[in-house]
Image: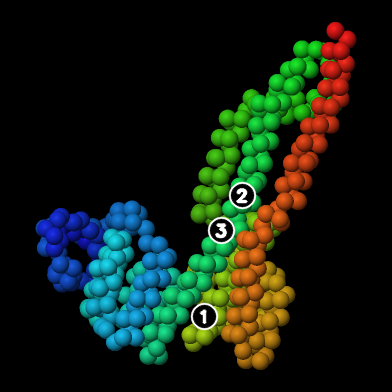
Amino acid sequence: MNLYLIEALNREGKKERKIVEIDVEEEIFRFLEFSGLIPLKIKKVPSFYRYLNIKKYLYRIKKQEIIETLENLHIVVKSGIPVTNGLIDIAEDTENPALKEMLTDIAYRLQMGYTLSRAFEHYQDAFSPVVVSLIKIGEETGSLDKTLKDASEHLKRIEDIKSKTKQALIYPTFAFVSVFGAMIFWLVYVLPKIIEAFKDFNVKLPAMTIFIMYVSDFTRKYIVLIIFLALISFFLIAVFRKKSEKFRYETDRILLKLPVFGIITTNFNYAFFAEYIRLMLVSGVPLYQALNIMESSVKNMVFKTAIKNTREKIERGKSFSDALKEEGIFSPVIVRMISIGEQAGRLDEQLNYISNYYYNKVDYLSQNIAKMIEPIVIGIVGGFMLIIMLGLVGPIYDLIAEVSKM
């Protein structure tokens, strides 16, 4: 694929600059004619120029737009309208310039003789590998309308699971940030004033109070440095997670063990795993290939590694359930149900049960998360206030006694 930077006039007579990826140089003018553009300047550019496509960043294509596009394509195919014409019509109706450009390019590639799945492969990041695989299967089996519908429903389901997971994570994040913010406020602003009063009256301070004074004084003096180091730490963690798969694996493993957050993330990955594999099997994709495709879609490195290992064990002759069991991160419920599904020849049904079970679990967590974390928040706040009270009650009593003598 070669990249070209093109300056051209559109149908409204306005100047446009766009980066186009073309196989053969001779195809550029056909593409421009297809897009209704009059070329002013054409220049071949290095491959890194694809990252300078401003529309890609200014106008992000949302998953909801992808879902609507697939649903519309399903109607187009079912009604017998040529897919190229359907894509152009969908592109005309969209308000997102990035989506419009993507659909126009796909339509052009179809006109050049590409299959729909091959044209979609170019935008796999937007559509996801599973959608591209489903479209390819639909083309091969003559059931493209069905696979497009399945793809849109799959993305809807996954987006719904993600939405429920985010909803479940928002409250605990807010609660813990608020609690620690309140604790910092006490250490930096409230306690120094109380401790200053003790010093003024020469009150004898116990060891607990001295410890609190030290923590408060340290926090007040170095609060800016603490915040700076925290930000630097988050930045370095983000960088190392991108650069090192081993580091990313270890941090993902720690996240899965965290209270509340780990439970929500684990249940999300269980639901995602079952829904993904179920859809691929129903569509006719072999299990080995389904796991191979899924590997690129999973974000959590622990689950990604487990899926890769499972695929390799299946290749060596192990059953699906035994391979999952050996990984140790899948719950006994999942392993047992998959084992039954394998023996009964109804693996897709069992995966559907698993997907629904964990989807409902994530939904329940999102609705009842406040009750779950309440004991943890109360424990943290209670423990902090207990230390404060133990450190301050004695000196306050002595301070009152000193004042009463005056």
Coordinates of residue 76 in the picture (x, y in percent): 31, 81
Residue 11, picture quadrant:
bottom left
Q: Earlier in the sequence, mark 3 or mark 1?
A: 3
Q: Earlier in the sequence, mark 2 or mark 1?
A: 2
Name the amino acid, label 2. Thr
Give me the disc on residue 173: 2
Q: Callout 2: helix, strand or loop?
A: helix
Q: Residue at x 63, y 83 (%)?
A: 350
Query: Given this view, does label 3 or label 1 mark the residue nearer the observer?
Result: 3
Read off the residue under disc 1. 279
**As drawn, is 159 to the left or to the right of 255?**
left
Considering the image in quadrants, where does the C terminus appear? Answer: top right
**Marks 2 and 3: CB-CB under 8 Å?**
no
Read off the residue under disc 3. 166
**As drawn, is 100 to the left or to the right of 381?**
left
Q: Residue at x 65, y 74 (%)?
A: 357
